[in-house]
Image (cartoon, grey):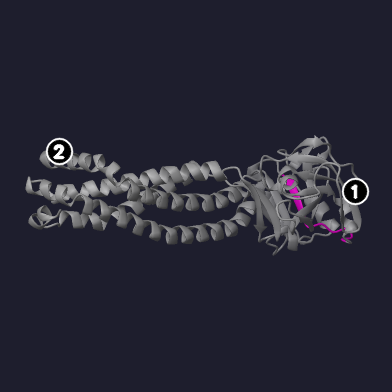
Amino acid sequence: MFRWFQQTVTVIELSLRSLPQRAGPSIVAVVGITGVVVTFVAVLSIAEGFNAVMANAGSPDTVIVMRGGSNAELNSALPLESTRLIIDAPGVRRGEGGPQASAELFVIVNVPKKSTGTDANVPLRGIQPAAFVVRQEVRIVEGRRFNSGTNEIIVGRAASNQFAGLELGQTNRWGQNTWTVVGIFEAGGTISESEIWCDAAVLQPAYRRGSTFQSVMARLDSPDTFQSFKDALTADPRLDVQVVRETDYYSSQSAQVRGIITGIGTVIAVLMGVGAVFGAVNTMYNAVATRTREIATLRALGFAGSSVVVSVLVESALLAIIGGVLGGAVAYAAFHGYQTATMNWQTFSQVAFSFTVTPALLVQGALYALVMGLLGGLFPAIRAARLPIVTALREL
């Protein structure tokens, strides 16, 4: 066993020393694998970024109450009387300003994207004053809060960056009102930053919604009171509602988009990976052909065929790892933090987010590169081990 190990190390050293003589084909293989890893990591970073925006939203002690059977705020409707019952229900945290709950309205407005000029669906959320207490992560970073009873709006940082006409001081015509941007807010990079906020009492007549709302956002005394709060509301014959933790609500909304993006990214990576494997196969066959007499000489001196197989696989794996590391570095440098927006199919509105290249994605990219390298080197390695010694020694 020790002798085999020594032989294998020797063959690997000889193989790696001869790499500069085969620099051209080796570089081609590295570049091919680099391209696959860049695409693989970049596409999956979209899903990671979108999921981060959605999954990090809310807190365990915050709930969203909608009409029974609704899967999103957009298709929910709650009359004023129901919202009052929900806000006054036992379990809702109370502070100096009263119950920490906000009855809210959710409409979609058309706003052009800065990058393309095409219209996009952006959420315009009507809130009550308690919304700022419920969502404690929200803070004004430019301008000020809107004044109640006025046509003033505040805009999330991500929405302001992605869409035109949402900078401080600009005006927009939506519904029956002209709205003025008086503030920009941040919310820890969560989905709230993709929204526009205004006074719910002003938004209702602007869209002829009467006194109806679509949801109630409430902060509970503690996360442990969720079930009792939910049971109290669903058992009340005056109400037809469903109660969901805010974290679960947004997490479920991200599942569909994440699944689509991950599926597409995997298909693209596999198709490109097939091409990269063929490139690696060609490179390693070339390497074996170049070293035919060297390999035959080693075999004639008593080196095991398995040592030759390992040396070819190690060389192929090394080239693949180099490509994987380069691909991960390029993907991180080019895409990490890049801001864009995509459709949330649950609400048919845009969600602004940043590409997120995580350490886990970089590891996945490197492992995928290693798999491609090993597959690409497998058949050339077997061929090298099976070379007839006498015939190979006669080759020029």
| Dot placed on the residue nearer the N-terminal end, 1 or 2 | 2
Which residue sits at x=14%, y=41%? 7
Picture quadrant of residue 92:
top right
Within 10 angstroms of label 1, few (less than 14), some, or many (20 or more) residues? some
Q: Nearer the viewer, residue 245 or 31?
A: 31
Residue carrying label 2: 6
**Residue 379, horizontal then vertical, whole percent:** 25, 58
Span colored in magenta: 209-219
Can residue 100 be seen?
A: no
Q: Taking 65 as reference, is 254 left or right? A: left
Q: Where is residue 310 drawn, in percent x and y?
A: 22, 48
Q: Position of residue 56 (x, y in %)?
A: 62, 44
The residue that disc 1 covers is 151
How far is the residue under mark 1 from the one under mark 2? 80 Å
Element assignment for label 1 = loop
Q: Please tell me whether residue 353 is drawn above or below residue 95 in the rendered image.
A: below
Q: Quadrant of residue 276?
A: bottom left
| Callouts 1 and 2 close, C-beta under 8 Å | no
